[in-house]
């Protein structure tokens, strides 16, 4: 038995699987995000612990015999979060999350201090961890001075589980302090942020043992003091669950944010188009990602302002879309990463007329998100990473209409896995199995069976190619407008 624990932005999930990776039990606990100022996004790490206590406790009560045979635990979580601890491991302030844009002004200053592009292999973006620490140093200097350790969110859970300050390569690559090619902390990049190695966790690979479960927790849950795997950042862990471990394979995640993920066997950055180049969660493997910040969150936003549920909005879009919506949409509701690297980018509709209806808006939101993914496809190809097909995962992938739009807008053939949960918690459980067995082969990280393939529709693809040109032209025109808040 293996346990995967995934710390998501909106909730924490535990998945218990057997030795053949069949699901034994799943438990969830919700989490909330605090937004005390525009552009800010924070969580209280104490809520993560409470959520983990609940979900693991639920599985222990519901499946005591299976939990008694537990062999290892794997961890996954949202990346880039800055969890600051003092010398007594007490949290100094709420965790600054991945989608927090407050450190935008610090990015240029930080980039000028060291070769972040060359060593970390990524642009200095407000979502990453390093500029968050520079913001803290400049705006909360007393907190910065007391910071003894900086942990990523899932690694704070690890500290609670094991008592160890340990991180792993895939998540650490998202801090901007890792030498991604060498898979080690960079003293130069840390110094540029006013930090040093002593304030960083020890690094392991995602399939390595990072520590053992604390005795009191093991007794509470009726399990042995099992090893806890290094685990992975949420996207790398999802890739482990999907078997996306070798070049030529990828996945497209339609979640709150959007990710186009491709595995690579070498370190191959493309900072010019804001491609993320990170270590994978297994040794000697890397990956590239195009990332958009508002995927299904764009539909959530439309739901909130119209008073209609997301399923109601999705149902307004025909499964077999015949033509593009007359309305265009930029999905930059939280800024954007690939390819813009612009935390201040804003969303927009265009082409609105008196006859425009909610169905037009719903379809245009789906199309705008699909065009953002098309940007990611082009950016990965420019980085030398060809991608023609990808597994479709995430909540938005339940909409067949959206997948058809996505395939035609991006040119990708989308692969629908057979029924099952192949998300980050499942990938974390597979990393737990690799940790317990020492096996990182395809026996552990096998891809799922494919239920259906959704290929681009030639006629719709041609129509979307024209609308994509308008989409690409809209952002610079909108950017040139004066800020109405000034």
Image: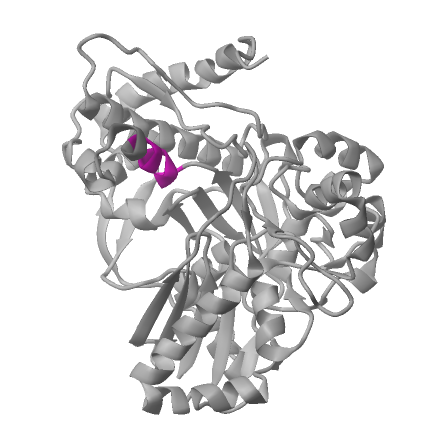
On the image, the x and y values in percent for residue 41 come to 54, 43
Q: Percent x, y for residue 252? A: 39, 46
- The x, y position of residue 139, in whole percent, is 75, 39
Q: Is residue 385 left or right of residue 138?
A: left
Q: How far from the left and from the top, in percent, is residue 289?
A: 52, 45
Q: Residue at x 51, y 45 (%)?
A: 34
Q: Quadrant of residue 183?
A: bottom right
Left/right placement of residue 346 relative to residue 149 reads left
Q: Residue at x 26, y 35 (%)?
A: 456
Total labels: the figure holds 0
Q: Quadrant of the N terminus?
A: bottom left
- Asked whether residue 63 is in view, the answer is yes
The image quadrant where one finds the C terminus is top right
> Closest to the observer: 20 or 302?
302
- How is colour applied across the structure in the image? one colour
> In this orientation, which residue lies closer to the viewer: 480 or 267?
480
Camera sees residue 411: no
The span picked out in magenta is: 295-302
Answer above or below: position of 77 versus 177.
Answer: below
Tell whether 172 sits left or right of 432. right
* Residue under the image location 56 percent in, 27 percent down: 340
Magenta stretch contains residue 21: no
Residue 137 quadrant: top right
Is 240 placed above or below 338 here?
A: below
Judged by its main secondary structure, the magenta piece is helix
């Amino acid at each position: 038995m293996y346990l995967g624990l995934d710390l998501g932005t909106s909730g924490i999930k535990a998945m218990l699987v057997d030795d053949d990776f069949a699901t034994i039990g799943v438990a969830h606990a919700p989490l909330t995000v605090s937004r005390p100022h525009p552009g800010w996004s924070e969580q209280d790490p104490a809520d993560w612990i409470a959520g983990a206590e609940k979900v693991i406790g639920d599985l222990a009560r519901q499946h005591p015999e299976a939990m008694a045979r537990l062999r290892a635990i794997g961890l996954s979580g949202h990346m880039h979060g800055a969890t600051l601890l003092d010398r007594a491991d007490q949290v100094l302030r709420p965790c600054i999350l991945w989608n927090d844009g407050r450190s935008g002004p610090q990015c240029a200053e930080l980039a000028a201090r060291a070769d972040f592009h060359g060593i970390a292999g990524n642009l200095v973006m407000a979502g990453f961890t390093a500029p968050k620490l520079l913001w803290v140093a400049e705006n909360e200097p007393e907190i910065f001075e007391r910071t003894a350790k900086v942990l990523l969110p899932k690694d704070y859970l690890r500290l609670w589980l094991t008592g160890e300050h340990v991180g792993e390569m895939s998540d650490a690559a998202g801090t901007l302090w890792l030498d991604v090619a060498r898979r080690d902390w960079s003293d130069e990049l840390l110094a540029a942020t006013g930090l040093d190695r002593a304030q960083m966790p020890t690094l392991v690979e995602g399939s390595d043992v990072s520590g053992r479960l604390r005795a009191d927790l093991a007794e509470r849950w009726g399990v042995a003091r099992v090893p806890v795997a290094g685990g992975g950042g949420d996207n790398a862990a999802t890739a482990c669950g999907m078997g996306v471990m070798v070049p030529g394979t990828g996945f497209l995640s339609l979640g709150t944010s959007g990710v186009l993920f491709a595995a690579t066997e070498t370190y191959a950055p493309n900072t010019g188009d804001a491609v993320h180049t990170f270590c994978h969660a297994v040794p000697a493997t890397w990956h590239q990602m195009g990332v958009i910040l508002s995927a299904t969150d764009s539909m959530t936003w439309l739901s909130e302002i119209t008073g209609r549920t997301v399923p109601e909005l999705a149902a307004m879009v025909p499964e077999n879309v015949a033509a593009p919506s007359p309305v265009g949409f930029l999905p930059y509701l939280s800024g954007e990463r690939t390819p813009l690297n612009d935390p201040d980018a804003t969303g927009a509709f265009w082409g609105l007329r008196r006859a425009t209806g909610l169905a037009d808006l719903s379809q245009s939101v789906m199309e705008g998100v699909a065009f953002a993914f098309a940007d990611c496809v082009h950016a990965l190809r420019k980085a030398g990473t060809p991608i023609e097909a990808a597994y479709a995962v995430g909540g938005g992938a339940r909409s067949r209409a959206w997948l058809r739009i996505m395939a035609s807008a991006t040119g990708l053939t989308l692969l629908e896995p057979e029924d099952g949960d192949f998300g980050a918690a499942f990938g974390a459980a597979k990393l737990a199995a690799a940790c317990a067995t020492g096996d990182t082969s395809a026996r552990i990280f096998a891809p799922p069976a494919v239920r259906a393939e959704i290929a681009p529709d030639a006629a719709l693809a041609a129509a979307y190619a024209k609308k994509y040109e308008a989409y690409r032209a809209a952002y610079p025109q909108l950017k040139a407008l004066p800020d109405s808040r000034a």
